[in-house]
Amino acid sequence: NPLAKNILTELGAGIDAGYLSRLGELSVDDLIYRHLEPLPVEVVREGPPRKVFEIQVRAMGQGSSQRVMTLRDVTQEREIQTRIQMQDRLATVGQLAAGIAHDFNNIMAAILVYTDLLLGDPNLPKASRDRLVIIEQQVQRAASLIRQILDFSRRAVMEQSTLDLLPFIKELERMLGRVMPETIRLELTYTPGAYLVNADPTRLQQVFINLAVNSRDAMPEGGALQFALERYTLQPGKKSPLPDMQPGEWIKITVRDTGTGIPPDVLPHIFEPFFTTKPVGQGTGLGLAQVYGIIKQHDGHIDVSSVVGRGTEFHIYLPAVAEPNYEKKHTEPLAPLDGKGKVVLVVEDDQATLAALQALLEARNYDVITARNGYEAMQQYDRFGEEIALVVSDVVMPQMDGVKLYNALMDRSSNTKILFVTGHPLQGESQALLERGDVHWLQKPFSAREFTRLVQGLLEA
């Protein structure tokens, strides 16, 4: 091992007072004293480059005064272990965050709907109206944080389509050029061609904006922010740049800055939610956590390297696709927001949200029937049948959830119109259903205008 030879060369004749004592405050006598311990001693050479070694001393034979020192480079093993521990830690925190997001979405949905209803009162005093506007703004801020948590926990519903990253990042670069300080130079490097991935453009834009904002904050005196695009082929049997990365065709995006860099003790934690080194009030600690979750939900990988005082690089790998699969989106004209007595079945297990949706629809002149789960909804459907013009349903409910309700209604009548409203982080069958593209859904919390316009659009389609 050349590294071991280098260490031995550095040790030289003064082995008992040389390199080992500088590494781990150990002498050869210390290692000999510990020669019966089953585990080797781990020492770190800070570098650069930083290296980790396991060192063990063993007697050459029983009663022998001669010793054999074994040095093993375990740098890569420790890096892999660190990545696995980080992924496990992030997965655990993501599960907790997802549960919190569900409850908060229901709370925010009811607050926002009732706020919109109050704002629609023409007799409301101006002072009260101003206060309600502030409440509405704060609810929207809370909703934004919840969306970041859902992105991190990888439970957000993605609207993916074939996307060419080259024109996408060119447009992003133009947008950033208008908002970045003049002291920061933007660069884009690539070779001509198509860089096709299957992605949600809104979510990917959030990724690159978050990284650009972090780079801006790391370059208070100015510098360079570079985006680089390249195709990357991982051959079977070849060493992958990241654990769990499968052989195949990838698109690699590098976001590089010349900023202050990230200290080594901070680097392992940067993707953890709510972890931030910024002063209080200047960061939520969700930006890079959101980036991590979005990339993972795109079946991609992300890595980071940084040198203090020289800058930081983020490497993103997304699966490449061969052919575009663009889908045309049609928009239908909307009629005036008047329900005209049409019957809507609202299915929601959260009582406050159910009452808010009922009040909102009745205020728009709809007749509302309610149910607390899919089982009750089917009873109401059997009772009222064709009178029901639209079913508005939550997804996650006890006894019979939204997916089972959807399948049961489709078995009864393929013409039944359904709108899902969801505040729960989704996975499995429910997430696959909403991502199909032919199912209408709305993320909680939503404004009264968003909800009623979507309802009206479905009924008039």
Image (cartoon, grey):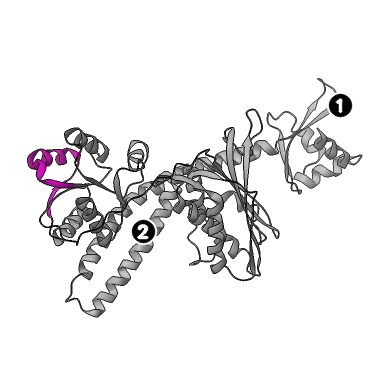
What numbered label is drawn on residue 285?
Answer: none
Residue 359 in percent (x, y) is at 16, 59
Q: Please name the amino acid that badge 1 sits on.
A: Gln
Query: In the figure, residue 41 lies in which quadrant?
Result: top right
SS category of the residue bearing label 1: loop
Q: Is 171 in front, or is 63? A: 171
Residue 233 in percent (x, y) is at 63, 36
Quadrant of the image containing the N terminus: top right
Query: In the figure, residue 378 lies in which quadrant?
Result: top left
| Left or right of 137, for residue 218 | right
Question: Does 416 appear above or below 254?
Answer: above
Q: Please name the amino acid that badge 2 sits on.
A: Ala
Residue 276 visible at all: no
Instruction: Tell me which label, 2 or 1, sits earlier in the chain.
Output: 1
Indicate whether residue 375 is drawn in magenta. yes
Q: Which residues are magenta?
A: 367-390
SS category of the residue bearing label 2: helix
Q: Which residue is mark 1?
A: 66
Q: Which residue is mark 2?
A: 143
